[in-house]
Image: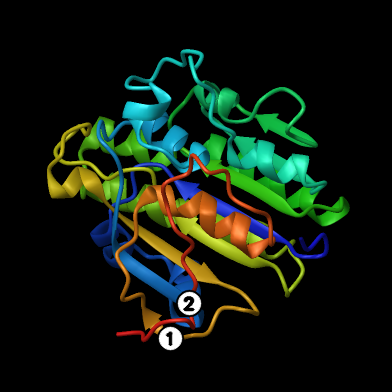
Amino acid sequence: MSQSKQLVLFLVDGMRPDGLTQADTPVMDRLLAAGAHTLTAQTVMPSMTLPCHTSLFLGVRPSRHGITTNIWTPQVRPVPGLFDVLQDAGLTTAFFYNWEELRDLGRPGALNASFMVKDTTGDGGADTAVAQLAARWLANNPFNFAFVYLGGTDIAGHAWGWMSQPYLQAIAHADRCIGMVLNALPPNCTVLVTSDHGGHEQMHGTDCPEDMTTPLLLAGPEIPAGGALSQPVQITDIAPTIAHFFDVPAPKAWIGRPIVPGSEQHA
């Protein structure tokens, strides 16, 4: 286990890979060029925010964790989540977000810091507020793992349609928010950027490729700049990847495998 390493996971809710490539995203473009990436990662069904996040953090599919809507229900057979595993290993964890339904991703006591800003306008202001909070706290406090959630892109997709101009502008705004946080981080911090699901028209939740396909960018001092990952990537691979980064054993219930750039050939 390494208590000196640092990793920040950014999640841009509802960001499709083609939205990332078409929007004005200089920050994410630099991360894409500097590390390893895939534009064909797959999420879970139903492709909705809370089920997808729960699969990301608990490392199992909805059929196992039981969350199939955007309403949290306690698990009958609890699965240890990423926050819980890292906290139990003595690592410092933090969470910055603007959709309160995500608050149960870690059990009580699994976080050293947690900041929630409710999005009441849908104009990107809540993403800015989350980024400002994260930048300020991460610059002034020791940490190992932080999760920064930006929900404005999903709101724009529902309001205006996925791949609409306001949707692409929301991705561009999320990119600036990520840049704000990156400017506050030490240069040796590893960064992972992904999404929970995509979308089509003004909706998501189906198994169509536009809903199920997400991007994943991974950059840091231990990540070779090799281009596209050749291995298939599932959202359930993210928690094992982060646990592996910190040399923390993954719970047996987790079904994913670590994404380890450099151990494979890049396309």
Residue plotted at (27% across, 31% down)? 159
Q: How is the image coloured?
A: rainbow
On the picture, is 185 further left or further right than 150? right
Choose between 92 and 59: the one closer to the eye: 59
Residue 19, relative to residue 133: is it above or below? below
Quadrant that contains the N terminus? bottom right
Label 1 element class:
loop
Residue 184, relative to residue 75: is it above or below? below
The image position of residue 238, as x and y in percent, is 48, 53
User: Which is more foreground, mark 2 or mark 1?
Assistant: 2
Choose between 106 and 33: the one closer to the eye: 106
The image position of residue 152, as x and y in percent, is 43, 38
On the picture, is 39 further left or further right than 121? left
Residue plotted at (39% across, 52% down)? 171
Quadrant that contains the C terminus? bottom left
| Label 2: few (<14), some (14–19) or many (≥20) C-alpha neighbours in 10 Å | many
Q: Is residue 176 visible?
A: no
On the picture, is 143 further left or further right than 175? right
- The residue at which mark 1 appears reads as 226
Q: Is residue 25 visible?
A: yes
Choose between 23 and 12: the one closer to the eye: 12
- The residue at which mark 2 appears reads as 261
Q: Amino acid at mark 2?
A: Pro
